Image: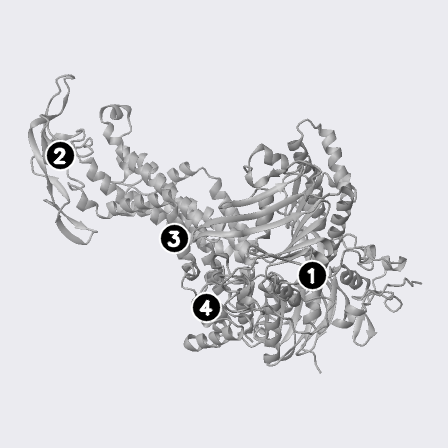
């Protein structure tokens, strides 16, 4: 079964300009040899902390940023298997009919000067799909599907609450009936009680329309509920992939262990032993070898010089650590790890 | 599916929710009293200019040669004996010797009184340049003269000339700003969005024009206008000169806004929907710059008015038979004038009033432009 | 040890807007115990930030405290000072802010002046409260505070500008700044919301350690149930300007009484829940403060809604057991829970 999206070895480097004539001053490898697959009809979570590159990955897939290397194979219903990384603008425009993005902040992703019907209808108008009366009817349909009253058709975004605005963003993303939806932190800017509603909505829409989600998030609780597989990123590299519940129960990478251990839990009285965390390194000057070694409790000499490869752990899981096979790491249930490093 | 129950539309729900950004801005603007006052003053000024021939008691070129340098001949309700007249009147005037200074001057004749007449017939004119008409708002019967602001050295009624001068002074600024707007916004959008060497070169050009001192450059450019050009051609020439220096500042502002808006989510969303560059610029970027552009334009107009006033004051601007406030002030250049015929400085009041009003309106617009700001 | 550090009673705060007077706080009561942490839990619009502003008497125009008392028992024995009665810019109030009550905020980047070094901002605060302090003494104190918040190489950090530090480090500096005058109460307004989870974990640990070392009280404002659970001894849950539940954190968050708290707990995605389960979302939306529902503020979204009662009568904050309070008709005295 061809996955809907197959990211292979993608890298993205930014040059940092500066100095008197905006000379290149340094480079940031926002993405470094990133590989993962997104099977059709599933939800893949892309998690990591700020600076890990997950948002960059989302924009590289959508074509807002160009990849510096690697391949992004997209199984387009019309064009067949297309490499997005090497696609020209014309091809990109065709693929965008089948993949759309949900943005994080509904306040900044909706033009405050446009009415809802203009906003949601824009993809339809721009791509010449429909206009006029047919367009209005279609937009009204979309509004109902995301649970908004059609009374809001001619209103402006500021007339709606944050949660309602995010529904508009979702409706707009669905206007062209895409197969793949890249959701970049879609609920992070919403109130707690609205997050659940929105997640449920996204789940229902997925079932109705056979959508595939690439769900970019930093909240592990949400990732646990919503995703089937998870890709954990750190400083531009993928450090672990696999089925979500497996990663959370028995992680194979020390960073995943640290992340999971740091999440505050209800019922915790602050007595749980949390992992030592260290400082996040600068993206411009990442540590050599394994990026994570300065903060890793299991680091050995080898980790400082040798970059570990993303190796299969069986069961469809991958981890980028020299010692994944031998380490027993603590998951959500807190099984203590034994340090067995040769 | 719809597990979000939408509350029923409450009749007490504030209608703020339904208003567009433009309407919200207007509401906020109106609450700023100074700005609103400024706007009213400007409306009055522009109406004055539009209806100038109707409001003026005399024609613009009409001279009263015996009454050159006459002080303002006001309307009075109470005469020299203290009795009240329901219809105000002006005193008669005649040339004579001032008993104190022994100089030839115009003296008030208190026996002659000419009551105010409404809508009298006067010199025919074309209202708005199109509609022929004869009646004016007010006047007095001949040989009475109503010089509300006095007369100038050639015996022309200053009040009339100020009204006609408003037509030029108030519109040269507008026209120049529109030119600047079109140039500035267009170039600002393009350089901001595309960047690259086009942007760099344009910025250097703008910097060079900004580095010049404004008035000398205006003077130099104005001097380039051929003296053989007609009054109207000179008018447009001056507009172009004035706008040459202001488009740069506008372009830079617009460019700065575009640079920051370029990476915002809603522009990205439009790109991911396959919107063309043109659509993004016109539909998304341009409207977002409107509020700023409007403010800059509103604040640039007074600069242009001052510029025209300065140029005409120095004799390099508007040419007769057109008249402007600056040209009127041109005749008030010497100390002697100020001492002997100080009423010739009245156009200054109008200039100042107009500029202050524009500034209030511009400030009010700037404050109102972001109606969602706390 | 017996008198709470701060006792708030009947606090009402109102905002004058275009649409009329809106109540941000509807008569709330709570106490901040000495040396312990009280968490205020709620979503946006519930009034938690306004509460913090009230305690510092910094309610932003057009809002103001219209009724109630905020009694601060700083000196231990005395009758305490009512902050609500003091004028916001008075000398008495300024003596409280900093040396007695301090605050840390959500956005460490925008809470600092980008033009001054971190050290300068701390010494400015020290100087404001002790005019006689010498420059070297102030600097030494600043470095000591930075060391206290576990910053590496504090003698170097003291000369850095805010933009040169990471988010986590800035938050630590903010804590150092707040603690530099040795306050008895630290108000933390969502201090970790903008941080990564690993950095959040560090900051929470730091706050707990500092509390143990300095014996200070913390009023911790958050919307994150996990964070409240970790940090708080007592928790109050707010909704639309009312306190709806109160009690020891471990009890309230594991066995809530009020339907809102219960619904919130159910709807939050948790890392230790069974994967793929559907979340029980709270239906409806939070009403805007100018559309306050009659009776119980939560009734429009409540699953245990009793028609005729909940939409007519506002429930009192009734005691349930010895240490807990709940504002719900289901817990009215005399009614079986």
Residue labelled with disc 4: B8
Above or below, comparing residue A337 to residue B291 in the picture: below
The tag on residue B26 is 3
Q: Chain of mark 3?
A: B
Distance between mark 3 and mark 4 Cα atoms? 29 Å
Q: Are marks 3 and 4 on the same chain?
A: yes
Residue labelled with disc 2: B64
The kind of secondary structure element at disc 2 is loop
Q: Are marks 2 and 3 on the same chain?
A: yes
Foreground tag (3 vs 4): 4
Q: Mark 2 or mark 3: which comes first in sequence? A: 3
Residue C323, percent across and down?
69, 55
**Image-quadrant location for residue C112:** top right
Q: Chain of mark 4?
A: B
Distance between mark 2 and mark 4 Cα atoms? 74 Å
Name, please, the residue furthest toward the bottom: A1
Foreground tag (2 vs 4): 4
Residue A148, percent across and down?
50, 71
Foreground tag (1 vs 2): 1
The kind of secondary structure element at disc 1 is helix
The tag on residue C253 is 1
């Amino acid at each position: 079964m061809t996955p809907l999206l197959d990211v292979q070895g993608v890298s993205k480097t930014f040059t940092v300009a500066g100095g008197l004539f905006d000379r290149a001053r340094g480079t940031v490898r926002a993405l470094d040899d990133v590989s993962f697959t997104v099977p059709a009809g599933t939800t893949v979570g892309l998690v990591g902390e700020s600076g890990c590159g997950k948002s960059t990955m989302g924009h590289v897939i959508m074509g807002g940023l160009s990849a510096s290397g690697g391949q992004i194979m997209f199984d387009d219903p019309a064009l067949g298997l297309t490499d997005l990384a090497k696609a020209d603008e014309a091809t990109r425009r065709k693929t965008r009919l089948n993949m759309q993005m949900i943005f994080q902040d509904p306040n900044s992703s909706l033009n405050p000067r446009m009415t809802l019907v203009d906003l949601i209808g824009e993809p339809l108008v721009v791509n010449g799909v429909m206009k006029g009366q047919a367009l209005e009817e279609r937009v009204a349909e979309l509004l109902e599907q995301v649970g908004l009253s059609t009374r809001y058709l001619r209103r402006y975004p500021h007339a709606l609450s944050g949660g309602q605005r995010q529904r508009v963003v979702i409706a707009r993303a669905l206007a062209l009936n895409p197969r793949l939806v890249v959701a970049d932190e879609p609920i992070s800017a919403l109130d707690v009680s609205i997050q659940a509603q929105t997640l449920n909505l996204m789940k229902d829409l997925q079932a109705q329309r056979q959508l595939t989600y690439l769900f970019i998030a930093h909240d592990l609780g949400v990732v646990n509920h919503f995703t089937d597989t998870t890709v954990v990123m750190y400083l531009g590299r993928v450090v672990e992939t696999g089925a979500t519940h497996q990663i959370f129960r028995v992680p194979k990478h020390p960073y995943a262990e640290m992340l999971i251990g740091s999440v505050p839990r209800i019922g915790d009285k602050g007595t749980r032993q949390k992992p030592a965390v260290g400082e996040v390194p600068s993206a411009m000057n990442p540590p050599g070898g394994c990026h994570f070694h300065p903060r890793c409790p299991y680091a050995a000499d080898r980790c400082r010089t040798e970059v570990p490869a993303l190796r299969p752990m069986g069961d469809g899981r991958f981890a980028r650590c020299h010692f994944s096979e031998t380490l027993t790491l603590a998951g959500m249930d807190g099984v203590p790890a034994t340090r067995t490093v040769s | 599916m719809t597990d979000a129950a939408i509350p029923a539309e409450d009749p007490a729900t504030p209608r703020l929710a339904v208003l567009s950004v433009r309407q919200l801005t207007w509401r906020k603007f109106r609450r700023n009293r100074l700005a609103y006052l400024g706007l009213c003053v400007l409306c009055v000024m522009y109406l004055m200019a539009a209806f100038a021939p109707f409001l003026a008691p005399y024609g613009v070129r009409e001279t009263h040669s015996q009454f050159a340098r006459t002080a303002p001949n006001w309307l009075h309700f109470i005469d020299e004996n203290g009795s009240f007249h329901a219809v105000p009147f002006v005193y008669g005037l005649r040339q004579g010797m001032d008993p104190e200074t022994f100089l030839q001057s115009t003296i008030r004749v208190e026996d002659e009184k000419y009551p105010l007449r409404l809508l009298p017939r006067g010199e025919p004119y074309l209202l708005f340049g199109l509609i022929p008409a004869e009646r004016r708002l007010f006047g007095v019967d001949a040989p009475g003269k109503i010089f509300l602001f006095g007369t100038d050295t050639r015996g022309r009624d200053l009040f009339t000339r100020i009204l006609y001068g408003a037509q030029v002074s108030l519109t040269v600024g507008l026209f120049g700003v529109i030119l600047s707007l079109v140039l500035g916004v267009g170039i600002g959008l393009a350089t901001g969005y595309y960047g690259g060497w086009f942007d760099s070169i344009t910025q250097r050009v703008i910097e060079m024009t900004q580095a010049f001192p404004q008035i000398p450059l205006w003077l130099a450019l104005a001097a380039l206008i051929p003296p053989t050009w007609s009054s109207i051609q000179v008018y447009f020439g001056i507009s172009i000169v004035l706008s040459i220096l202001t488009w740069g500042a506008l372009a830079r502002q617009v460019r700065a806004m575009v640079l920051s808006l370029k990476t915002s989510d809603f522009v990205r969303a439009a790109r991911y929907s396959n919107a063309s560059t043109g659509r993004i610029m016109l539909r998304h970027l341009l409207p977002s710059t409107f509020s700023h552009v409007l403010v800059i334009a509103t604040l640039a107009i007074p600069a242009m008015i001052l510029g025209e006033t300065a140029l005409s004051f120095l004799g390099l601007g508007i040419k007769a038979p057109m008249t402007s406030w600056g040209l009127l002030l041109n005749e008030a250049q010497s100390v002697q004038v100020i001492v002997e015929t100080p009423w010739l400085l009245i156009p200054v009041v109008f200039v100042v009033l107009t500029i202050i009003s524009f500034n209030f309106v511009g400030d009010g617009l700037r404050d109102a432009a972001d109606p969602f700001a706390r | 040890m017996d008198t709470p550090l701060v006792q708030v009673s009947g606090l009402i705060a109102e905002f004058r807007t275009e649409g009329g007077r809106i109540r941000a706080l509807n008569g709330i009561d709570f106490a901040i115990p000495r040396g312990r942490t009280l968490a205020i839990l709620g979503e946006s619009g519930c009034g938690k930030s306004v509460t913090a502003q009230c305690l510092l008497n910094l309610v932003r125009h057009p809002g103001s405290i219209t009724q109630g008392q905020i009694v601060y028992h700083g000196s231990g024995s005395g009758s305490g000072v009512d902050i609500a009665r003091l004028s916001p810019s008075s000398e008495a109030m300024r003596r409280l802010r900093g040396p007695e009550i301090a605050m840390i905020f959500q956005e460490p980047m925008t809470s600092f002046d980008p033009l001054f070094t971190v050290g300068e901002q701390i010494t400015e605060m020290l100087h404001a409260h002790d005019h006689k302090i010498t420059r070297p003494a102030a600097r030494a104190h600043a470095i000591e505070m930075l060391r206290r918040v576990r910053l590496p190489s504090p003698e170097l950090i003291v000369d850095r500008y805010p933009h040169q530090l990471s988010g986590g480090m800035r938050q630590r500096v903010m804590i150092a700044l707040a603690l530099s005058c040795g306050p008895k109460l630290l108000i933390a307004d969502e201090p970790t919301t903008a941080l990564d989870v690993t950095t959040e974990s560090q900051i929470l640990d730091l706050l707990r350690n500092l509390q143990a070392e300095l014996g200070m009280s913390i009023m911790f404002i958050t919307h994150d149930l996990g964070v409240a659970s970790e940090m708080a001894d007592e928790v109050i849950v707010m909704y639309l300007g009312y306190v709806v539940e109160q009690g020891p954190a471990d009890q309230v968050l594991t066995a809530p009484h009020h339907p809102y708290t219960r619904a919130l707990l159910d709807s939050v995605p948790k890392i230790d829940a069974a994967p793929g389960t559907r979340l029980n979302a709270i239906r409806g939306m939070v009403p805007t403060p100018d559309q306050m529902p009659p009776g119980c503020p939560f009734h429009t979204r409540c699953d245990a809604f009793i028609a005729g009662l909940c939409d007519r009568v506002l429930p009192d904050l009734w005691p349930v057991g010895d240490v807990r309070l709940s504002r719900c008709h289901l817990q009215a005295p005399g009614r079986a829970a």
